[in-house]
Image (tube, helix red, strand yellow):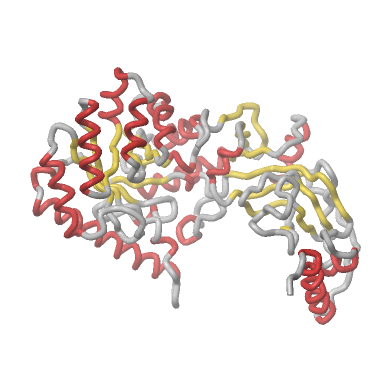
Amino acid sequence: MNMNRRAFLQSVAAGLTLGAVGCGDSPKTSRGTGQAPATDYFGRIAADLDAAGIGTPRIFVDLDRLDENAAEILSKVGSGRYRIVEKSLPSLDLLAYVQERTGSNKFMVLHLPFLPAILSAFPNADVLIGKAQPTAAVESLFDGLSRAEWPSVASRVQFIADSRSRLDELAALARRLRLTLRVSVEIDVGLRRSGVTEPEELPEVLAGFLANPDTVRFTGFLGYDGHVAHVPVLWGSALDWVWAAWEEATARFESFIDVLRSQFPQLVRDDLVFNSGGSASYPMYQSGPVNDVAIGGGVLRPAAYPDVFCGVLQPAIFIATPVLKQYPTGMLPFLTAEQSARVLQYKQGIAIYGGGWAANFVSPAGLEMAPLVSDPENQNLVPNQPLITAPQDVLLNPGDWVFLHPKQSDALFQFEEILLVRGGRLQKDKWKAYPRRY
């Protein structure tokens, strides 16, 4: 028998109603003292947003927290090994600030259309492409530049080959362009998404450099460890499992280097780049073969990063969005007032100015997405005005502010303007997101 949406919601509500009665829940009607006071961190920022006459969602970066995060990361990897991952920091202003704070001129770029802006904004940048690209994308990159710019790009950028066929394609492209491309080889250290899978497969790829010495120049290995911090914890300490996964990934990295040194000594140089790491694993790279550690969003500490090592970093990126409507007791579509009240545990209903962000609520305390209408995340039925719930002792009126912590710092890309906070107060200066979209 088919069940329409109204019947489905009412059946769920009935089940939750029985559960609520059985647990002895009762209506709560007390009201609180209003939005966080001006002495509170988010309360002060809310006051500054009001004073600035802002009434739409904004994203902001806390510069003090960013500074402390950058210093913490530098203390573990040093500026000489720090490679700034632009993907998680999609703002030339933000990248320039991080470069100044870290002293690094090394960048990792994952989307080739962003590369020209990086090269232009940072004339001394050394760029490693963060994944193997379709050769057509590399060719399109050069086609979009003037012929006079090609030699500079070829000398400053390390492209990626993950197989002999990809390397041969890059060599053929370089021959057509009359260039020598710098190319690193991606190796699989356990992520199982790309790269040369096993060390015994590496000789065929490295032989391609010897066969094409005028068109491709070997520059090192890229072995992304993105799986390490997410290792399943079956028993005991999560930290122990992460360390074990890192040690396995490091051993695999070393096995590829062993092949290079033993079978292709003519390709070995002191300036080879052995890149790995990430914001979730950077403290582990104080020993081992990796001499180049990629770190992006860690300086902003978005919400989705695992706490194993990122727990020492401070959240430095937030979204502020205004309240559009407040209901003393929340209401859900297709349900009666009483059914809605029981499903929402007699909490307030708050409609906010939404954007479908993947984010966690951080202020005021106790805010949650309304059940039954909250799938996918933060996109409940009408993502431009999501329905959330609030405890009855939180006073939120239209125009008040709700604050969220984005799960990924890529959320900056959804906003053309980035507000800045220093000393807990909104600053006059503003940054811009990337000049082009993906």
Residue 129 in percent (x, y) is at 34, 40
Quick one: 298 or 221, which is closer to the camera? 221
- The answer, for residue 366, to whether it is visible in the render is no
Front-most of residues 394 and 304: 304
Q: Is residue 339 left or right of residue 188?
A: right
Q: How many marks?
A: 0
Assign the N terminus to one quadrant of the image. Answer: bottom right
* Res 345 quadrant in image: bottom right
Q: Residue at x 51, y 51 (%)?
A: 313
Relative to 178, say whether 405 is above or below: below
Answer yes or no: is residue 282 visible: yes
> Which quadrant of the view contains residue 376?
bottom right
**Residue drawn at x 61%, y 51% as measured from the top left:** 358
Residue farthest bottom in this picture: 22
Asked if residue 360 is positioned above or below residue 7 in the image, the reply reads above
Residue 135 spot, x, y in % from top left: 31, 39
Q: Which residue reaches farthest front?
A: 1
Q: Residue 316: where, in percent of width, then height?
A: 57, 45
Quick check: 277 left or right of 309?
left
* Residue placed most toward the observer, 423 or 348: 348
Q: Which residue is pictured at 88% across the width and 66% down the height?
A: 28
